[in-house]
Amino acid sequence: MSAKQTIKHQIAGFVCFGIIALWSGTALAEDHAAPLQHAKTDLSDEASLQRGAATYMNYCLGCHSLQYARYKSTAAGIGIHNDKGEVYESLVQTHLNLVSDRVNDPIRSALQAKDGEKFFGVAPPDLTLVARVRGNDWLYSYLKGFYLDSKRPLGVNNIVFPDVGMPNVLVELQGEQKPVMRTVHIKLSDGTIESKEVVDHLELAKPGSLSPEAFDRVVLDLVNFLDYMGEPIKLERQRMGVWILLFLVVFLLFAWLLKREYWKDVH
């Protein structure tokens, strides 16, 4: 087999593997997970990042740390500074840093890991990188996906994360949701058909302090903030990536011209 044929077979193999992987992932999502809602985040929107930071500090930091980031650097990154780039430290200490008395401290929760494990069965995880691990759409759908479930210890479940051990900390804003069930039929390995009740969608049973539209905005801002925390230089990386790709295109052109010049007399 020639080298050219070998390369063609390798490319075909990668393409087939990719198709199989995508099909398997789609099948898994359809069988075991709720469809995710798209989160239209915008890291260039500093007002959204600031609102998301405020929501996080008030509703999430009680259990979940962001220990790989610091208050002052985070404030600088989301626009809490003057025209000279100097952070408004008093503003940070008044509205964001509700745990520590130093603006340069890491963003840590006051809840001890052993206490979290005692209260919830497992210590609440640090969320600095949660957006990179789970994805923005997952976070957005998860935060909106809590519903009443009397069978769970905390009285709530989640359509994206079944049997979740976390309470719905945003319930006062969102209100209480109830599940609307549907029956699905699953074919088992022995050929028999099993019927199962699953959550089809959620309906608002008791309104919260915010309208559904306003609550969606709050959740989107929170996800936007967590997306920033997962990679504070994301926008800079994307801008730099454009220039790098342009450089590579130009470099490839000159490399091809050089190769053609060197090999023009080779038969």
Image (cartoon, rainbow, N blue to C red):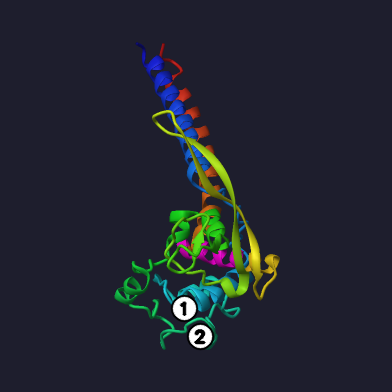
- Is residue 221 highlighted in magenta? yes
Q: Is residue 22 left or right of residue 205?
A: left
Assess whether residue 101 is covered by the magenta stretch. no
Residue bearing mark 2: 89
Pointer 2 or 1: first along the chain: 1
Residue at the spot 51% in from the left edge and 75% down from the top edge: 59
Q: Is residue 42 above or below residue 199?
A: below
Amino acid type at circle 1 is Lys
- Residue 115 placed where, x, y %? 32, 77
What residue is shown at x 46% (from left), y 18% (from top)? 264
- For the question of whether residue 182 can be seen, the reply is yes
Q: Nearer the viewer, residue 13 or 222?
A: 222
- Indicate the position of residue 60 as horizontal and vertical percent values: 48, 73
For residue 72, which numbered disc appears in the image? 1
At 64% from the left edge and 73% from the top edge, which residue is drawn? 208
Which stretch appears magenta?
219-231
